[in-house]
Image (spheres, rainbow, N blue to C red):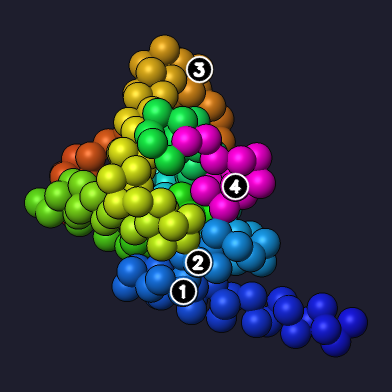
């Protein structure tokens, strides 16, 4: 019982340590993500929390709309799970692209390593909560995307010991597949996904940071006049 409680309390500290190391391009962090089951679990937890962070930035919409607490928590979980799925797709795409390089095919035993590296590369997106900021929020989101891309390439290089050219190709190809799939699904299933977001959160959550700020200012002005 004591060991279980100790793990519960130490796990958040381990997450912080691993995420901080990954953000700083730590060779050790990505080597652990490629070889340790515990680190891979922590990496996917980091990807989940990255989604939660982004949703927290958007959650001002939910607060303004006074949605129920359970909807608020469901929205955080929904976005967190979507980030985990994205990390999995990115990792599996990297795995599938490997045979196109001179490195050859990665073995089935490497799937966990590749997906762990991809998930850990989501660490910079823990700052996604700040993407709500007007004027520079969108630029910050793009910067975090590039940062994650660089970490995937770095992780493949040091964690799986791929040559730099193969790491760049596989990491880039994985990102393209992941982005393309997200775009395709987003367009092909726009209506049902929109209804699902509304069902979960009570709001479409499709506004830009500047639109959110404008809506808040409009509400404040209307309340002041009334």
User: Which residues are drawn in magenta?
Assistant: 104-115
- Picture coordinates of residue 111 (x, y %)? 60, 44
- Picture coordinates of residue 76 (x, y %)? 52, 50
Q: Residue at x 34, y 43 (%)?
A: 166
Residue 94 in the figure: left or right of residue 113: left
* Image marks 1 and 3: residues in contact by CB distance under 8 Å: no
* Image marks 2 and 4: residues in contact by CB distance under 8 Å: no
The answer to whether residue 129 shows anywhere in this view is: no
Q: Residue at x 47, y 60 (%)?
A: 159
Q: Quadrant of the N terminus?
A: bottom right
Q: Residue at x 38, y 18 (%)?
A: 184
Q: Nearer the viewer, mark 4 or mark 3?
A: 4
Magenta span main SS:
helix
* Image marks 4 and 3: residues in contact by CB distance under 8 Å: no
Vertical comparison of 218 with 132: above or below: above
Q: Nearer the viewer, residue 142 or 223?
A: 142
- Would you name the residue on which mark 3 appears? 192
- Would you name the residue on which mark 1 appears? 28
The answer to whether residue 199 shows anywhere in this view is: yes
Q: Residues within 10 Å of mark 1 (few under 14, many from 20)?
A: some
**Spatial CA span between label 2 and label 1:** 5 Å
**Spatial CA span between label 4 and label 3:** 35 Å
- Picture coordinates of residue 119 (x, y %)? 49, 52
Q: Secondary structure at mark 4?
A: helix
Q: Secondary structure at mark 3?
A: helix
Extreme-right residue of the structure: 1
Vertical comparison of 164 with 46: above or below: above
- Would you name the residue on which mark 4 appears? 110
* Image marks 2 and 1: residues in contact by CB distance under 8 Å: yes
């Amino acid at each position: 019982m004591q060991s279980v409680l100790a793990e519960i309390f130490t796990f958040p500290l381990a997450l912080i340590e691993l995420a901080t190391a990954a953000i700083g391009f730590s060779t050790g962090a990505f080597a652990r993500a490629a070889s340790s089951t515990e680190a891979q679990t922590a990496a996917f937890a980091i990807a989940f929390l990255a989604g939660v962070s982004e949703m927290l930035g958007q959650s001002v919409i939910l607060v303004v709309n006074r949605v129920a607490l359970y909807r608020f928590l469901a929205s955080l979980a929904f976005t967190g799970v979507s980030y985990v799925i994205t990390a999995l797709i990115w990792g599996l795409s990297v795995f599938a692209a490997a045979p196109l390089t001179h490195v050859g095919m990665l073995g089935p035993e490497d799937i966990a390593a590749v997906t762990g590296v991809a998930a850990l590369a989501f660490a910079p997106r823990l700052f996604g909560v700040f993407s709500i900021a007007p004027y520079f929020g969108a630029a910050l989101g793009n910067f975090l995307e590039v940062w994650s891309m660089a970490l995937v390439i770095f992780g493949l290089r040091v964690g799986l010991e791929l040559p730099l050219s193969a790491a760049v190709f596989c990491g880039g190809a994985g990102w393209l597949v992941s982005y393309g799939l997200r775009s395709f699904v987003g367009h092909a299933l726009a209506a049902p996904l929109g209804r699902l977001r509304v069902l979960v959160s009570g709001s479409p959550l499709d506004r830009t940071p500047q639109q959110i700020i404008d809506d808040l200012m409009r509400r404040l002005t209307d309340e002041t006049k009334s």
